[in-house]
Image (cartoon, rainbow, N blue to C red):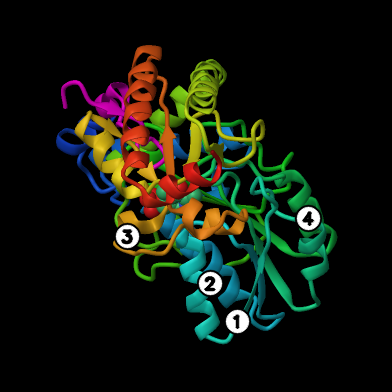
Amino acid sequence: MKDMIYLDNAATTKTSKEVYEAMKPYFDEYYGNAASVYRFAGESTKAVDDARLIVADFLGAKPKEIYFTGGGSESDNWALKGVAFAKRDKGKHIITSKIEHHAILHTCEYLEKLGYEISYIDVDENGIVKLDELEATIREDTILISIMFANNEIGTIEPIKEIGRIAHEHGVIFHTDAVQAYAHVPINVDELNIDILSASGHKFNGPKGVGIMYLRDGIRIESFIHGGSQERGKRAGTHNTPGIVGFAKATEIAKESLEKRASYEKELRDYLIDRILEEIPYTKLNGHREDRLPNNTNFSFRFIEGESLLIMLDQKGVCGSSGSACTSGSLDPSHVLLAIGLPHEIAHGSLRLTLSDENTKEEIDKTVDELKGIVERLRNMSPLYEDFIKKNK
Ligand SMILES: *Cc1c(COP(=O)(O)O)cnc(C)c1O
């Protein structure tokens, strides 16, 4: 779309041109089934094998520890159910946090219905998981700790290495939903004590509908999809060869450019944060000021409905996201914003703007300028704001 300013890269990203070009031949030229034996299919088999090598190398893992899946939600479902079903004789207690993605939280609710017990750990006002509470919650029958690497709404990066260390000291498996972090911050599964990890292609300029699960060698979990013998018999289904090639290509690009890209995005991010906090009164930044994703910003504007803000921004060509779950047809404010202690009315007035390395300073300036006008207009229509101004005269 012409003149659009896309600031919703936490929701999804553009598939990069190089990724798209790398995928193309696997649709119409090398369309063989990667599981077939003739030489023509060998091109597909080789592409999947090579992709596995690239991803494994990127995470400091072995190729046989990488499983290709249908995306982040699938990897999260598999990690939780796979461990829950395989370890049910040891115990049925799982620990997670209050700020996880719904792919984790709704899977936990499902497991609760099957008789599992889930503990949801609190976070502090910046969204950092409380480590003392986490450790105190571990029991004899705890089989899994699942804590996200970085939060998709407020961008806070969790102390993953510490969480992994605590899990391992108690003999518990540690899974992390790294969908927002993979290819945005460096990850080495050994250094960070990670046993299972989820990532998704479309969150880092790869294709949609393809993801990975890293599973540490020696940890046994149940298969997710039953059928053919693909993915070591654990995840059946004909390989999505173009998708897998695209995932690997995007990983390769990230490996070369991660640092440069992150520092560019951070600069833009901090510029956006500074301008908004300085120029728009009664505004708060949500999430940790330093330990946050290079491309994430999340603000609460008092006396404002996030929904109205989004619609008016859209009219100016800016794509953002509301911190509240209203966008998905629910009127409840975001569970993440409530967990960091925001009152309902403030959580409702939140806005997430997430950047890419294609965004420019001019786009940020235009967005802030529009936002200032919109916030002012909305506040002038707000009875709450009127009361507030009267009281504070
Ligand atoms: C996007 C996202 C998911 C879901 O990934 P899909 O590939 O869209 O299924 C899971 N967890 C987090 C943190 C996400 O941001």
Q: Residues within 10 Å of mark 3 (few under 14, many from 20)?
A: some
Q: Residues within 10 Å of mark 1 (few under 14, many from 20)?
A: some
Q: Residues within 10 Å of mark 2 (few under 14, many from 20)?
A: many
Query: What residue sits 43% from the left and 33% below the top?
Result: 354
Residue contact at pointers 1 and 4, CB within 8 angstroms: no
Query: What residue sits 53% from the left and 47% below the top?
Result: 391
Of the pair 233 and 323, the residue shown nearer to us: 323
Residue contact at pointers 2 and 1, CB within 8 angstroms: yes
Mark 3, residue position: 237
Please name which of the two marks, 1 or 4, marks the residue nearer to the observer: 4
Q: Residues within 10 Å of mark 4 (few under 14, many from 20)?
A: some
Mark 3 / mark 4, whichever is N-terminal: 4
Mark 2, residue position: 108
Please name which of the two marks, 2 or 4, marks the residue nearer to the observer: 4
Where in the figure is residue 300, as x and y percent of width and height? 49, 42
Which residues make up the magenta segment?
Answer: 1-22
Amino acid carrying label 3: it is Gly
Query: What residue sits 49% from the left and 19% below the top?
Result: 268
Q: CA distance from mark 2 to mark 1?
A: 8 Å
Where in the figure is residue 160, as x and y percent of width and height? 70, 46
Q: Where residue 131 is drawn, which disc sits there? A: 4
Magenta-drawn stretch contains 264: no
Mark 1, residue position: 116
Main SS, magenta residues = loop
